[in-house]
Amino acid sequence: MRIGKRTHDSPLFILPGKLLNRDVSAACEIPRARITTTESAFMDTNMMTQWIERFANEVPTPIQRPVVLLLNGASSHMDEAIDMRAKQLGVRLVQIPANASHLFQPLDVAVFRGLKSVLRQEINRFMLNTGKSGLTKKDEVSLASKAWVSGVVDKPDNIRSGFREAGIFPLSRPAMSRRLAKFTSNG
């Protein structure tokens, strides 16, 4: 998500396996979305390096470097090679403390809950309409891309409110303190 331009980047969908069939890629309706695979279906350091390169290349030229990229505490996000490549590209990595992304990560604060709700609705509707009890990779990509449009693209104010509520932009110590109070009170 980009707060400067108030836009979002296209998503990266990671599927389990080694190969990606063309029909799976064709099921995605989001321009410039990237679909890839890993054995575990989770981000790894190689993929993260590629993603940072893509991110850096999509930052418009007039924007002064370094730019800040806020990351959660996933181990695949932080590695010496990733950090060095980010520095070469003029990207400053800032990591949210471990176990605190639900408090300070703007997407966790205001976007992902709605996105997950839309995705669950899409899956339920699909299964009721088709009678299927499982999803293929093609189904997963199709449903996830529809949910992304409904839950993210069509709701840009949620992105902005996530940064504001987390106290990240505009920078707000009182907002951060309110979020931290939720953590200390087990909220």
Image: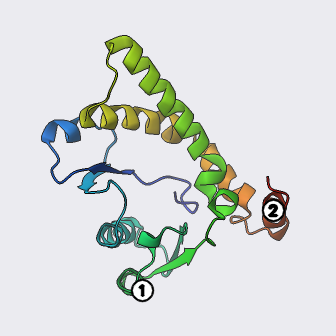
Could you tell which of marks 2 and 1 lies nearer the N-terminus?
A: 1
> Is residue 139 at least partly visible in the picture?
yes
Residue 38 x/y as whole percent: 26, 57
Residue in view at x 14 percent, y 42 percent = 21
Above or below 86: residue 139:
above
Give, as a three-letter code, the residue at label 2: Ala
Marks 2/1: CA–CA distance:
29 Å
Residue in view at x 16 percent, y 35 percent = 23
Of residues 96 and 1, the one nearer the viewer is: 96
Give, as a three-letter code, the residue at label 1: Lys
Q: Is residue 159 left or right of residue 184?
A: left
**Residue 3 sits in which quadrant?**
bottom right
Circle 1 sits on which residue? 87
What's the mark number on residue 175?
A: 2
Above or below 127: residue 71:
below
The residue carrying pointer 1 sits among few (fewer than 14), some (14 to 19) or many (20 or more) residues within 10 Å by Cα, namely: some
Residue in view at x 71 percent, y 60 percent = 166
What's the mark number on residue 56?
A: none
> Is residue 32 at least partly visible in the picture?
no
Residue 164 x/y as whole percent: 72, 57
Residue in view at x 80 percent, y 56 percent = 186
Q: Is residue 185 left or right of residue 165?
A: right
Above or below 25: residue 124:
above
Residue 157 x/y as whole percent: 63, 44
Q: Is residue 98 left or right of residue 35?
A: right
- Of helix, strand and loop, which one carries label 2? helix
Residue 185 x/y as whole percent: 85, 58
**Residue 163 sits in which quadrant?**
bottom right
